[in-house]
Image (cartoon, grey):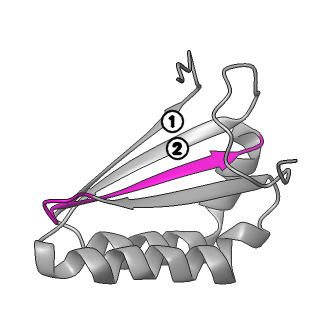
Amino acid sequence: MANENTTIIDPKAKCLTLINVYEVDPEKQAELAEALAASTESTIRHQPGFISVCIHNSLDGMKVVNYAQWATKEDFEGFMKKPETQAQLKQFAGLAKSVAPSLYKVDTVHAA
């Protein structure tokens, strides 16, 4: 049975999805992924409405993708308004060449 805080991609789920694509120099990829993971473990996962974060490193070393799920848009917006969140985001952006965050809802899922 899945833990309620497990990433499940389900179009019926009412959660909000953030997909954040960081473009990085290959020598910064591991550092950014580690910073995202450490911040998630120490702070983000304890925020109201947090469900999960998955961090992906591209095979070419040039991108880090952060796939995050939040219970509601309001929970996510509350998290984003915190000064400590803004400080963390600046730290992450300092490791990247560009950052492209977008909010999504799951439309469909196809599986084998």
The numbered disc on residue 35 is: none
Residue 101, position as x, y percentages in the image = 39, 46
Res 9 → quadrant: top right
Is 41 magenta? The answer is no
Q: Nearer the viewer, residue 8 or 75?
A: 8
Question: Residue at coordinates 75% horizontally, 19% vertically from top-left?
Answer: 12
Crowding around mark 2 (Cα neighbors within 10 Å: few <14, some 14 to 19, many 20+) is some
Q: Nearer the viewer, residue 112 or 16?
A: 112
The stretch in magenta equals: 58-71
Q: Which residue is mark 2?
A: 18
Residue 32, position as x, y percentages in the image = 33, 76
Is 51 positioned to the left or the right of 61 in the image? right
Looking at numbered disc 2 in the image, what kind of residue is underneath it?
Answer: Leu
Whether residue 101 is situated above or below residue 88 in the rendered picture: above
CB under 8 Å between callouts 2 and 1?
A: yes
Looking at numbered disc 1 in the image, what kind of residue is underneath it?
Answer: Leu
Question: Residue at coordinates 45% horizontally, 44% vertically from top-left?
Answer: 19
Is 63 magenta? The answer is yes
Q: Which residue is mark 1?
A: 103
Crowding around mark 1 (Cα neighbors within 10 Å: few <14, some 14 to 19, many 20+) is few
Q: Nearer the viewer, residue 13 or 83?
A: 13
